[in-house]
Amino acid sequence: MESPPIHIPKILRGAAKIFADASFQCWLVGGAIRDGLLGRKSYDYDLATDAEPEDVIKLFRRTIPTGIKHGTVSIILGKYRFETTSFRQDGPYSDGRRPDKVLFSESIDSDLARRDFTVNAIAWDLVNNKLLDPHRGREDLDKRLIRAIGNPRVRLQEDGLRSIRACRLASQLGFRIHPATLNAISETCSNISTLSVERIWEELKKILQTEKPSVSFLLFKQTGLIKVLFPEFDIHLNPPLGKGIDSFSISLRACDLANPANLFLRLAALFHRLGYFAQPAKNEASAFLRSANIARSILRRYKASNTESDSTINMLSKLDFQYNDDWRDADVRRFVSRVGVGQVHNLIKLKCVITHANLPSGATISSKSPSGVPKNRTTSSGEIGQLQNLIKRVNLVIESNTPLTIGALAINGNQIMDNCRIETGPKLGELLKFLLKCVLENPKENNHDQLLSRSRGWLNEHP
């Protein structure tokens, strides 16, 4: 009896016994087996069985018909959710997205044969405790290789998302793509246009969560996928900046340096030079604003969420700030107020990774400081050091509970209208902005009587 490649939860063994008692097979398939054989942790347990969806629903008390048309039912057991798919053979993929019809099968071998890559076509028999690897996926894992099953051109033509997934796995696992599969990606780029943008966006977000998204994007460039996925990058892919560094490389280096767990930061780092690609910019501020506008167009095209889009664009549009140690405390308060407490740390981290990305090749560009901002080992008093100092000063401002918004003032619009004979409208809005400006300059002014006096003085000057 073989040992399983990963830890099998007791509750999953219980599920396998339910299948076995009903004379059905139960196999663990997909990424969990692949990651387990690589020594990587995985909590994504996908099952394959010769039981048809209706049988699965009868066997288990709690199920969800996730994709019953294609044979998938989710089994809910305790805190776990197991995606369970009936063995199947796919019909033709005439639309380049999904099979025209699905035929259920009694064979795990036929089910594995329809999958995308050899490393994803390994299965563990949960009933009889044995590994099945008909396409030599373990061999490719040892070679650190992504290889399509069967004829790579046919396999990638079936579903355009597989080309993007191959590049994602290369980033995620640190693998290379087999030459024949890589050529097939170049030959089948056209079927990407048949995919839903939602499917593409989910795959792209997974890429941005890998350790080095640059691996995928360089493969996009090599295969021509970049022209389909991000034509904005392809317009001027390698504009020279001197010192052998180009805008595309700087964008990728910045993206790699950003925290993988922070999607907004990675998106902003990836897109920050798009304004330079389109045409020469008058200054850095106009380039970043153009980058924000192009990013907005890309994120709208992929139907990104409002949060993903707004957070990314907000950072890019405010990236032109130039901090130095001459800033007064009032300047720091105004900066935090303008950017927003929720985004100010992200903005400074973005500035920091971009600064690192522009260092000459060979310069030290990694190492984390306690603040979460990459720390530069080559300079202690340059821009990186200043940005780390800004982080500390911003934290002091936030911790002091200094009023940073109009809503935090010790007086509100209704109180001003009651005491100063002014009606609601643009003038009241301007007055409130003035009061916030006064408090940002001197937080001690944030008391009702002082602000009321300031209001009367401002109204006398602006009748």
Image: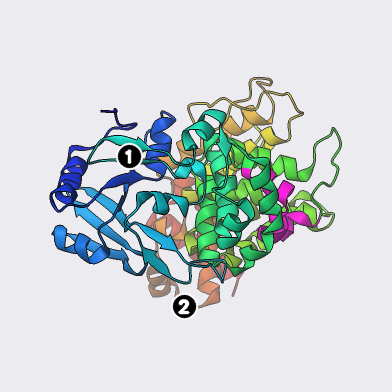
Label for residue 19? Answer: none
Q: Earlier in the sequence, mark 1 or mark 2?
A: 1
Per the rendered image, the range of residues in magenta is: 216-235
Tell me, yes or no, whether the highlighted magenta stretch contains residue 230. yes
**Residue at screen point 56% across, 71% down:** 94
**Mark 2 burial class by Cα count in 10 Å: few <14, some 14-19, many 20+:** few
* Kind of residue at badge 2: Thr
Label for residue 424? Answer: 2
Above or below residue 90? Residue 32 is: above
**Residue at screen point 82% across, 46% down:** 238
Tell me how far mark 1 sits from mark 2, CA to CA: 70 Å
Q: What percent of the width, then of the height, locates residue 347?
A: 57, 45
Above or below residue 13? Residue 235 is: below
Q: What percent of the width, then of the height, locates residue 90?
A: 45, 63
Does residue 227 appear left or right of residue 434 in this picture? right
**Residue at screen point 53% across, 34% down:** 140
Does residue 320 appear left or right of residue 91 in this picture? right
Q: Quick one: SS at disc 2?
A: loop
Label for residue 124? Answer: 1
Quadrant of residue 122 in the image? top left
* Kind of residue at badge 1: Trp
